[in-house]
Image (cartoon, rainbow, N blue to C red):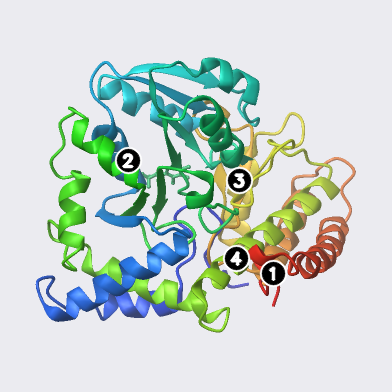
Amino acid sequence: MIRKTRLFTPGPTPLLPAAQFAIAAADIHHRTPEFRALYQKVLADLKVFVGTKNDVIVLASSGTGAMEASVSNLTSPGDRVLVLSAGKFGERWVGLAKAFGCNVDVVSAPYGETFDLEEVRKALKSDTRVVFMQATETSTGARHPVAAVAELLRQNAKDTLLVVDAITGLGTTHLDMDAWGVDVLIGGSQKAVMIPPGLAYLAVSKRAWEAMEKSRNPRYYFDLRKERKNAAQGESAYTPSVALIAGLGAALDYIAGQAGGDLALGRAKLVNNAETCAAMTRAGVQALGLKLFAPSAPAGAVTAVEPPEGMDSGAIVKEMKSRFAAIIANGQGEMKGKLFRIAHLGFFDYMDTIAFLGALEQVASALKFPGFAFGRALTAAQNEFVACQQNAKAQAKSPALAGAER
Ligand SMILES: *Cc1c(COP(=O)(O)O)cnc(C)c1O
């Protein structure tokens, strides 16, 4: 059989064809009215996509650039900060904050779990300047309670800023930055917005802009104040990634187009899509006798699954690639061999999910998963799909997701 290469990885994710065409056609200079019109539209659309009235800044970097910018722009050497860490991306916050001289407190949870809010509350000190966390920890497939942490800060630490790496959370989980009081919310291009790696974006609250004036950490390329000034004129401080910005514009148009041109509704629909693909996948792998790596708080962005006992997850990753050209992710760092990860963020749909689970059944058969029988994963996923459709219909009565099931 021929094999079509398919990415099922949590960044990069499959590319939207309309965005690929826009990228190829983006032959414009960045100090022209043509670019300014494009950039202004993309910045305005990004606000709607993020769901905020705050300014959104776009950087030519991978997601980590925006994480670094949050640290360098909001902290000074010696500042006390709190990192909530339960995986490789939480650990990245620790490394970044230390690199900029912060005094780092950490609340950690075991890989695959999320945080105890009481522990978070206790770890907040009167001088904690910033709390850093992930919306979804891509290395373990866990979802973290952003709304609850934001509420905790409102109750106990009014002056502490909250910075959320939502690089795989945006477009896969419901987030309400303005209502919850999140100060910085970060996204990346190679995730839910279906375009290649190379752009990071971040929404910044009013009080985070104010805090930047007082922070004494060095910054130059990632000076967000400079980007904001230029963005107000429809330009970026340095040469922007013109092609990716054109691709992002096309992707946001596509997302709006999924909901009759309403981008906010399109985003809600994208979130429902990821949540449905994730729920189908969880049902499917469990029906094969596999265990979820993050069963207590599974993310909509990515599902992490443990291999059968005694099997290295690399065998499943390898079989998926060699037989079906399907690229799934192994565990990161010390989790390598212990889990495999399937993404649901971005340009994935029902068909992709069913096809993936069909292929996984073939892999399970070839690798002799204990008690294996064909059809179990697919049957469970089909039933889950029906349940999700019914749920979405019921939820459509709530204003936040009105119409999102269509
Ligand atoms: C992908 C990802 C990042 C960014 O990684 P880059 O390689 O710098 O783009 C950050 N946080 C999370 C949770 C991610 O999934």
- Quadrant of the image occupied by residue 214: top left
Whether residues under marks 4 and 3 lie with C-beta atoms below 8 angstroms apart, the answer is no
Looking at the image, residue 30 lies above or below residue 334: below
Single out the mark in the foreground, 3 or 1. Answer: 1
Mark 3 Cα shell of 10 Å, populated few (<14), some (14-19), many (≥20): many
Residue at the spot of label 3 = 341
Of 93 and 206, the residue lying toward us = 206
Single out the mark in the foreground, 2 or 3. Answer: 2
Secondary element at tag 4 = helix
Numbered tag placed on residue 368 in the rendering: none
Residue 366 in view here: yes
Earlier residue among tags 4 and 1: 4
Mark 2 Cα shell of 10 Å, populated few (<14), some (14-19), many (≥20): many
| Residue drawn at the location 27% of the way across and 43% of the way down | 209
Residue 10 in view here: no
Earlier residue among tags 4 and 2: 2
Q: Is the distance from the Cβ of mark 2 to the nearest ligand 1 atom less than 8 Å?
A: no
Amino acid under label 2? Ala
| Residue drawn at the location 52% of the way across and 33% of the way down | 154
Q: Position of residue 383 (x, y in %)?
A: 87, 63
Whether residues under marks 3 and 1 lie with C-beta atoms below 8 angstroms apart, the answer is no
Mark 4 Cα shell of 10 Å, populated few (<14), some (14-19), many (≥20): many
Of 310 and 284, the residue lying toward us = 284
Earlier residue among tags 1 and 2: 2
Single out the mark in the foreground, 4 or 2. Answer: 2
- Quadrant of the image occupied by residue 136: top right
Number of numbered discs overlaid on the protein picture: 4
Residue at the spot of label 4 = 268
Q: Position of residue 178 (x, y in %)?
A: 48, 51
